[in-house]
């Protein structure tokens, strides 16, 4: 007798509970084995979805065939009972397994005819398509359910699924725990660890900190949920109010915020010491005077202390050096607008050319089809040329789409940059230090400072604007061989040096 393994599978728990599908498969396969002089030495039964690889019994069956070289026969009811993905198909093929499919009347092995293998492959594709289509239908149904306001999956702690009515209900035992978590944490006196301990004391339930954090961040409890990247208003009962949920988020954000000092220093992180390449930091003296100095991370440094007010004035000088005169600004903007008009004209011309080309291709396809029907050209000639023409047609359509869609408004961005350069210093002197720092960070990538000098590094395209402003080489278009000039150092006026320098040896 021929030794063989038997494999049966159902695709859902419902089929398992019915107790029909598996027994029916086993009975058919056992009868087939008796009538074909086959001895079943091992049975494998899976009650899972076949779309996902790594099924437990399927994996054990593969291991069985790897270890039992004398057994190379497998009995399965039909193709979709065995696999619905190509990986499992290739695995069994590489093992040289002869597969008997009684319900389909096929035997697939290395000696099978090509036609039988072709039919088997088609059945595999059909089975896989069935699985993919089922998945799409399930996703569509879940999306429809979400749009109706019902969360289409298992709800978080505090809720339970009503399977009879397909709704989500409040869990009477867990809901009070969730409410208590929000109420305690909203007061701001609890960390996540402390909240965990308090909940355990009050309820006897132990939850991990990460789990509690996830619960507190979940908008589901305030009546809103996210499904497939979209936000929906749920029809389920809210456990907390929107106000309480937001209070908890504010506390969470406050606990997670990096612990800097009591004071905020606007120019912190913007400057680098020219002597040792350390960052320039800030501190307060007498509770009201802010001084900036080198961190001294690499040891004692010669960089003096700078008062914030004087440092603000000197940093403003950097913005003066990218000033574009009003008349030059007008010419540049007019040139940009002219370029935009010319670009649109070229785009329209190219679009018209592509439309004419598309019409010719489609006319050629239509005429060739008629010639094929009339017998003027052979079917082989039609098929060979049709593929080429269809590819050409698709390329033209894609080119037209790219021409229409991929049109970022670069002119508008360029105009805003020019306007910023024109008004940067004017805006800077009218703002507080925090807003001044934001403006500087838009223009600068870094700025190095020594005893009396600032060395700014401008962001693009402000580096080019700086170079043109220094040489007054304003023109509507850049020269083809132009290169940005390295930013020059900004000299700190010596007349103000003593009033702005706070030496470490001097007390306030």
Image (cartoon, helix red, strand yellow):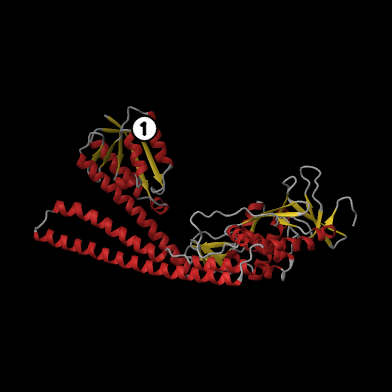
Left-right relation of 207 to 17: right
- Taking the spot 64% from the left edge, 66% from the top edge, the residue there is 323
Q: Quadrant of the N terminus?
A: top left
**Picture layout, residue 459 above or below residue 58:** below
Residue 54 higher or lower than 449, as above or below:
above
Rendering quarter of residue 176 = bottom right
Residue 241: where, in percent of width, then height? 64, 70
Q: Nearer the viewer, residue 215 or 487?
A: 487
Residue corresponding to mark 1: 65
Secondary structure of the residue carrying numbered label 1: helix
Picture coordinates of residue 77 (x, y %)?
A: 29, 44
Could you classify mark 1 by the number of other residues whose Cα lies within 10 Å: few (under 14), some (14-19), or many (20 or more)?
many
Q: Is residue 338 visible?
A: yes
- Residue 81 picture location, percent across and down: 33, 46
Q: Nearer the viewer, residue 232 or 447?
A: 447
Q: Is residue 232 left or right of residue 57?
A: right
């Amino acid at each position: 007798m021929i030794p063989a393994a038997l494999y049966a599978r159902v695709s859902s728990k419902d089929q398992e509970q019915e107790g029909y599908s598996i027994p029916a498969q086993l009975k058919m396969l056992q009868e087939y084995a008796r009538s074909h002089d086959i001895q079943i030495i091992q049975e494998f039964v899976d009650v899972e979805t076949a779309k996902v690889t790594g099924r437990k019994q399927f994996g054990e069956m593969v291991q069985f065939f790897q270890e039992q070289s004398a057994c190379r026969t497998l009995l399965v009811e039909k193709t979709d009972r065995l696999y619905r993905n190509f990986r499992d198909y290739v695995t069994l093929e590489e093992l040289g397994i002869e597969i008997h499919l009684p319900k389909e009347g096929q035997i697939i092995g290395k000696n099978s005819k090509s036609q039988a293998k072709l039919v088997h492959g088609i059945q595999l594709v059909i089975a896989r398509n069935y699985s993919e289509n089922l998945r799409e239908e399930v996703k569509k149904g879940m999306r429809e359910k979400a749009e109706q306001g019902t969360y289409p999956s298992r709800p978080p702690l505090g809720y339970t699924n009503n399977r009879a009515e397909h709704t989500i209900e409040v869990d009477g035992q867990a809901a009070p725990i969730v409410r208590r978590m929000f109420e305690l944490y909203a007061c701001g006196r609890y960390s996540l660890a402390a909240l965990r301990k308090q909940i355990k004391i009050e309820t006897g339930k132990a939850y991990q900190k990460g789990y509690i954090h996830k619960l507190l961040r979940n908008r589901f409890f305030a009546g809103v949920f996210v499904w497939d990247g979209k936000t929906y208003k749920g029809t389920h009962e809210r456990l907390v109010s929107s106000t309480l949920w937001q209070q908890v988020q504010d506390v969470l954000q406050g606990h997670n915020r990096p612990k800097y000092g009591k004071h905020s220093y606007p120019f912190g992180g913007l400057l680098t010491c020219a002597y040792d390449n350390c960052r320039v930091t800030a501190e307060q003296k007498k509770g009201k005077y802010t001084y900036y100095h080198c961190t001294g991370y690499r040891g004692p440094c010669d960089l003096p202390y700078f008062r914030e007010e004087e440092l603000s004035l000197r940093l403003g000088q950097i913005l003066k050096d990218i000033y574009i005169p009003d008349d030059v600004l007008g010419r540049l903007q007019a040139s940009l607008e002219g370029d935009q008009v010319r670009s649109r004209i070229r785009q329209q011309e190219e679009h018209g050319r592509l439309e004419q080309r598309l019409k010719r291709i489609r006319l050629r396809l239509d005429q060739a089809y008629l010639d094929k029907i009339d017998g003027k050209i052979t079917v082989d000639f039609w098929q060979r040329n049709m593929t080429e023409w269809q590819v050409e047609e698709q390329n033209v359509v894609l080119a037209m789409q790219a021409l229409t869609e991929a049109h970022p408004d670069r002119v508008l961005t360029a105009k805003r940059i020019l306007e910023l350069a024109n008004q940067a210093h004017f805006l800077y002197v009218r703002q507080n230090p925090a807003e001044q720092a934001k403006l500087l960070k838009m223009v600068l990538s870094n700025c190095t400072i020594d005893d009396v000098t600032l060395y700014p590094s401008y962001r693009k395209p402000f580096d080019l604007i700086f170079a043109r402003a220094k040489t007054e080489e304003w023109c509507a278009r850049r020269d083809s061989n132009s290169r940005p000039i390295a930013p020059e150092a900004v000299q700190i006026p010596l007349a103000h040096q003593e009033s702005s320098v706070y030496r470490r040896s001097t007390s306030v």
